[in-house]
Image (cartoon, helix red, strand yellow):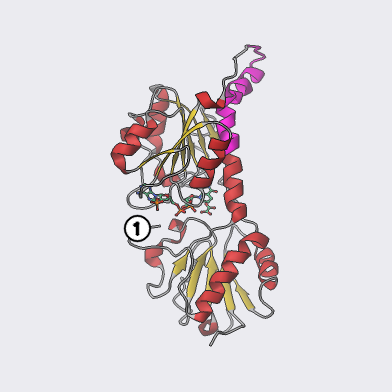
């Protein structure tokens, strides 16, 4: 029988526990919400909602039925360290997707309309006309066509860009040329003026943004990384910029966050850093899918957005 008073454990240094408590109250008449290290009767915890693993792990929650990631990605949880018997689900949320799409649009337009050059020209008091071009003349490639990548690709296509996309399994998307496999990726990026990465971090995708791939870029390509810092071989990016393969990069994620003070990406004229802000989920919207998964966990049903250990995402 379904238990209607879930005990939810919450751990995140990125998300507001108060906002999540309020959002959950809109979905459950009665629930127990435990935050931090002091958890009263850990054996009664049903569900863990977490961004990263708490120091003590989750083993003390011996009756845990579900782990719900507060991120679309799960690598920050190091799924290998989670209790194997408990299913893990990632976050899918309209507000998260929307903010990612908005970020991708802003970053693409900054290059497409040459704002990155005008920013420098403004600092140099330099008035040099650069004629605008049509979106149809700029090709954008999206790595990852899942919940977020697919929406980014559609949004770019609606803006009139020439859009291509790469995924693990074949896809048919209207007016978007799609590719699979490493050869497909190498061929796709050669056609792109702007490459956006929105892949999950897995054993297969770690360091995918490396010299091997950059050597298939046309000279002067722009790179936008919204996935994870460990997708990128940072030294290879600097080298590709020096060689002219990459003209500029917008990086929302870094292998070490916050990016260390002495990192060569700071102040680099061709690199724009943003502090992992591309996507944000708003508890009041994200709670709908989270609450649905809490109900499924309590009813012993299969969770939605389940992490697949074999695929790694
Ligand atoms: P999904 O799981 O919905 O989609 C992942 C996509 O990547 C799928 O299209 C999948 O292919 C593809 N993919 C996975 N592995 C491979 C591979 N080896 N080769 C080719 N394609 C592959 O994830 P989301 O769209 O929800 O999120 C993607 C990532 O975005 C997150 O994991 C996270 O890293 C990042 N993110 C970053 C944020 C930020 O603020 N910077 C915010 C939110 C997410 P297939 O379709 O065949 O399964
Ligand atoms: C996520 C993120 O994965 O914020 O949701 O990076």
Furthest-left residue in this view? 183
Residue 117 in the magenta stretch? The answer is yes
Taking the spot 57% from the left edge, 34% from the top edge, the residue there is: 107
55, 243: nearer the viewer: 243
Taking the spot 70% from the left edge, 70% from the top edge, the residue there is: 26
Horizontal side of residue 270 vs 213, given as left or right: right
Describe the element under mark 1 as helix, strand or loop.
Answer: loop
Q: Find residue 289 and report its image quarter.
A: bottom right
Residue 219 in the magenta stretch? The answer is no
Q: Is residue 206 visible?
A: yes
Which quadrant holds the C terminus? bottom left
Residue 276: where, in percent of width, then height? 55, 46
Furthest-bottom residue in this view? 1
Residue 167: where, in percent of width, then height? 39, 46
Residue 252: where, in percent of width, then height? 53, 42
Furthest-front residue in this view? 174
Residue 15: where, in percent of width, then height? 62, 59
Taking the spot 59% from the left edge, 52% from the top edge, the residue there is: 96
> Height in image: 277 above or below 56?
above
How many callouts does the rendering have?
1
Main SS of residues in magenta: helix
Horizontal side of residue 118 vs 221, given as left or right: right
Q: Residues within 10 Å of mark 1 (few under 14, many from 20)?
A: few
Q: Find residue 24 and report its image quarter.
A: bottom right
> Height in image: 210 above or below 278?
above
Taking the spot 55% from the left edge, 61% from the top edge, the residue there is: 70
Question: Dot 1 corresponds to which residue?
Answer: 311
> Height in image: 101 above or below 269?
below
Q: Is residue 278 visible?
A: no
Which stretch appears magenta?
A: 105-128
> Height in image: 107 above or below 312?
above
Disc 1 residue lies near ligand 1 with CB under 8 A: yes
């Amino acid at each position: 029988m379904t238990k209607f008073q879930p005990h939810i454990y919450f751990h995140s240094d990125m998300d507001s526990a108060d906002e999540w408590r309020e959002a959950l109250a809109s979905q459950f008449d009665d629930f127990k919400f435990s935050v931090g290290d002091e958890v009263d009767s850990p054996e009664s915890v049903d569900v863990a909602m977490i961004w990263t693993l708490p120091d003590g792990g989750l083993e003390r929650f011996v009756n845990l039925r579900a782990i719900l990631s507060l991120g679309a990605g799960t690598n920050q949880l190091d799924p290998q360290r989670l209790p194997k018997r408990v299913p893990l689900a990632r976050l899918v949320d309209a507000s998260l997707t929307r903010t990612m799409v908005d970020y991708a649009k802003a970053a693409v337009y900054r290059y497409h309309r040459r704002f990155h050059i005008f920013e420098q020209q403004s600092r140099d008091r330099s008035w040099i006309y650069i004629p605008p071009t049509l979106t149809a003349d700029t090709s954008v490639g999206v790595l990852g066509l899942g919940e977020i990548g697919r929406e980014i690709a559609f949004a770019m296509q609606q803006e009139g860009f020439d859009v291509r996309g790469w995924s693990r399994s074949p896809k048919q998307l209207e007016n978007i040329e799609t590719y699979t496999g490493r050869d497909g990726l190498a061929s796709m990026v050669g056609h792109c003026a702007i490459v956006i990465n929105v892949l999950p971090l897995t054993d297969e995708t770690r360091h995918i943004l490396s010299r091997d791939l950059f050597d298939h870029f046309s000279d002067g390509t722009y790179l936008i990384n919204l996935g994870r810092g460990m997708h990128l071989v940072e030294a290879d990016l600097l080298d590709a910029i020096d060689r002219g393969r990459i003209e500029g990069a917008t990086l929302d994620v870094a292998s070490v966050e916050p990016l260390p003070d002495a990192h060569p990406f700071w102040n680099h004229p061709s690199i724009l850093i943003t502090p992992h802000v591309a996507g944000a989920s708003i508890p009041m919207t994200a709670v709908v899918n989270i609450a649905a998964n809490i109900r499924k966990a309590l009813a012993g049903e299969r969770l939605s957005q389940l992490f697949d250990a074999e695929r790694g995402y």
